Amino acid sequence: MSRPSSDAEQLLRRLEWTVLRRLDGLLQGDYRTLLRGTGMDLADLREYQYHDDVRHIDWNVTARLQQAHVRVFTEDREMSAWFLLDLSPSVDFGSGEQRKRHVSTDFVAVVARMLTRHGNRVGAVLYGSGVDTVIPARGGRHHVLRLLHTLQTRPLANEADAGAGPTRLHELLEAAGNLVRRRSTLFVVSDFISEPGWEKPLGLLAQRHEVVAVRLLDPLELELPDLGLIPIRDAETGEQLLVDTHDAGFRKRFARIAAQREAELRQALARAGVDTLELSTDDDLVDAILRFTDLRKRRSQSSGAHAAGGRLPAHLQHAA
């Protein structure tokens, strides 16, 4: 096995200084809202404190003692996370300095390092024109470097790849379902430009694992500016079209179709029961991760209150 390249080392060092240091300060080391362990053991009971997860309230003890008590757990410290990486031709697209593929690599580097710093293991399943690479789950910084080296040295998608046919994301998800047996956190990193049929296997994964859909996008995929007559190539099929972006009617139709696809995609991800982190090529990675952790916190609180059936004591209502 070859040694990780200096490019991988440089990328990881840059992200450790520019992203991980900022996250350490802003999240104060609490990554539990982003990453959850594979198992929990009941350790103790204690009185409820502000900011406790209301889902952990023990209602039997609370009713008996007339004072809210929560179950205290010790989390399984060894967590495995898998990155299910869509590296199909459309992921090589980017209208600015960054391509979606670069955003994907940065995200993998940051989250993998966050995990391995705390003794957890990370692995990856890579999809190009099919599922072609599996990187077993291991720990340590050196393993993260090997993962980044693999991503950086893969050949970029080219026109010949694009002619191979559309992305079949369901193949990646089904492969992961067969490969990852132990309950893990799965990050499905994709632009979800794919043939239909991926929603069901994604939902099946979410029944067994903690699944996060990391959706890659570029602003140009949502709205076209007035650039005049330009050629557009379908990254999935290789088909080329000449379109007149000066035509306001065409731009409106494009935006309407894009908005419809956005709505359908978000509905499909919600039906599958997964949380979604959207990463745009013009986004700040730290800001995106913070938005996501805030969403998870609010969702955890609201789901905890809902699970209690509205039976929260009056003095605890503010916590939900």
Image (cartoon, grey):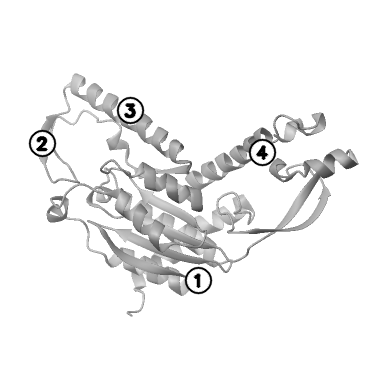
Depth-wise, is mark 3 or mark 4 nearer the camera? Answer: 4
Label 2 close to label 3 by CB (< 8 Å): no
Instruction: Please report whichever mark, 3 or 4, sits nearer to the chain's N-terminal start.
Output: 3
From mark 1 to mark 2, how far is it between C-alphas? 46 Å
Residue at image coords 37%, 42%: 199
- Mark 1 closeness class: few <14, some 14–19, many ≥20 residues within 10 Å: many
Residue under label 3: 259
Instruction: Work out how far the residue at label 2 is from the one at label 3, CA to CA, in angstroms.
Output: 21 Å
Quarter residue 254 falls in? top left
Q: Which residue is mark 2?
A: 241
Q: Where is residue 165 drawn, in percent x and y? A: 16, 49
Which quarter of the figure is the C terminus placed in?
A: top right
| Location of mark 1 (residue) | 139
Under mark 4, the amino acid is Gly
Name the amino acid, label 2: Leu
- How far is mark 3 from mark 1, CA to CA? 40 Å
Tag 3 and tag 1, C-beta contact below 8 Å: no
Residue visible at 45% across and 74% down in the picture: 142
Q: As shown in the figure, which amino acid type bears the numbered disc 3?
A: Ala
Give the residue furthest to the right. 65
Residue 60 locus on image (x, y percent): 81, 42
Kindly identify which numbered label has been placed on residue 306.
Answer: none
SS for callout 2: strand
Please give the label number shown on residue 304.
Answer: 4
238 over 222 or under it: above or below: below
Q: Which amino acid type is shown beneath numbered disc 1? A: Gly
Asked if the residue at tag 2 contacts the one at tag 1, i.e. Cβ–Cβ closer than 8 Å, the answer is: no
Q: Earlier in the sequence, mark 2 or mark 3?
A: 2
Q: How many marks?
A: 4
Which secondary structure lies at badge 4?
helix
Point out residue 284 in the picture as x, y percentages from the top left corner.
Answer: 44, 46
